[in-house]
Image: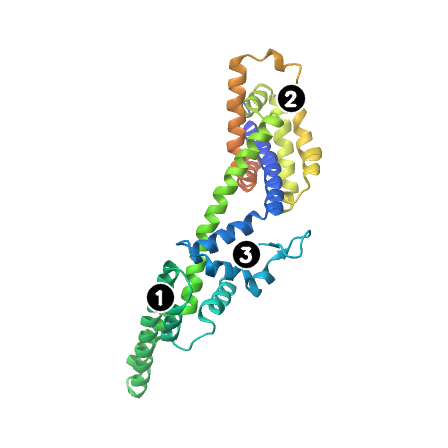
Amino acid sequence: MYILEIIIGLVFVMLLFSLLATTIMELISGIFALRGHNLIRGIKHILAHDGDDYIFKQFKNSELYKQLCAKRSWSSNVYRPPSYISSNSFWVIISGLIFRETSDNIEGYKERLEKAPIGDHLRNVLLQLAEDAEREDFLKRKVDKVRKSVEFLQNEEIKNQIISYADGVEEKVVSFKRKVEYWYDDVMDRTSGWYKRQTQLILFILGLLIAIGFNVDTIQIYQSLSKNPELALKIANEAQAYAGNNPSLEAQINTEILTLLNRDIAAIQSPLGIGWDFKAVPTYGISEWLLKLVGWLVTAISITLGAPFWFDLLRKLVNVRNAGVKPNVAG
């Protein structure tokens, strides 16, 4: 039995339809600016966590934020949210809104924070970051004094050890600005998790629609491959050629939907029975429909794993196949 060829065939099918779902997902994401709206959701979580959204609205009205946005083609006053804002840009915007100007010492920042028109949650977080930076700044000044005091030591070995230790301490000292940027980056990491969960749900819905629309029944495909060794070998060879002709997935994700449908998917549709035979539909009983529903669900769940997963798996399986002896149908 052609176990490896059957697995490669199934993986190849999942890859092609995952590519289709991913391409559609990218179109949806671009049209509705999903990444941008997710980013704004994360920034609102930072600036208006307790419901006071005054500073959040000011953030969105700032000139730098507007420069990072793209204007909608149908309106000069409606902005498309950016998909990315660097931690430095975030600091520049909020420092202008909250602190009005930069300060040479932490006390200056803390005084402005006490008077700033921001929510208590944001104020407390920034005050905590300022106090942490103040302690580290105090430590840095102490280290500087130690460095100066050892300049007169005669023992070079001891002096170098102390200076090396001082350098190590200074490297760990982080300014208030950097602490705010690290905090922002940490929240953005969690925001990426929100976006991933959102896209997983959309991919599952797309996967289910694709599975039903194209009748991509994983169980039926497996049965077709397992019962027909020549078909399994043929699809495995096509999958191997595909992997050889496409060393990277990036170009394939950017493939137009019609090209993907008419070139890659069309080549495997007929041999594997993908698609609808409406003459056979009336003959399906309850058990056949239930089995087909399970097959569609397996396909939809497989598509949510993403095209990169299936592409990497296909390349590994092809490498295993290349290292072994290819089966001979005639034998």
- Whichever of callouts 3 and 1 sits on the residue coming sooner in the sequence is 3
Taking the spot 62% from the left edge, 41% from the top edge, the residue there is 23
**Dot 2 alpha-carbon crowd within 10 angstroms: few under 14, some 14 to 19, many 20 or more:** few
Residue with the mark numbered 2: 276
Q: How far apart are labels 3 and 1 at the CA level? A: 26 Å
Please say if 296 is above or below 31: above
- Amino acid type at circle 2 is Trp
Please tell me whether mark 3 sits on a helix, a strand or a loop.
Answer: loop
Q: Which numbered mark, 2 or 3, is in the foreground of this view?
A: 3
- The percent coordinates of residue 8 (x first, y second) are 56, 32
CB under 8 Å between discs 3 and 1: no
On the image, the x and y values in percent for residue 139 come to 31, 74
Secondary structure type for disc 1:
helix
Front-lying residue, 201 or 128 = 128
User: Which amino acid type corresponds to the residue marked 3 in the rendered image?
Assistant: Tyr
Specify few, some or many for label 1: CA neighbours under 10 Å numbering under 14, 14-19, or 20 or more: some
Residue 325 visible: no
Numbered circle sitting on residue 127: 1
Q: Label 1 is placed on what type of residue? A: Leu
Left or right of 243 on screen, residue 107? left
Question: Is the Cβ of the residue at disc 2 closer than 8 Å to that at disc 3?
Answer: no
Image coordinates for residue 187, horizontal then vertical, percent:
43, 55
Residue under label 3, please give it: 84
Colour theme: rainbow
Give the foreground label among 2 and 1.
1
CA–CA distance in space, label 2 to label 1? 63 Å
* Quadrant of the rendering where the C terminus is positioned: top right
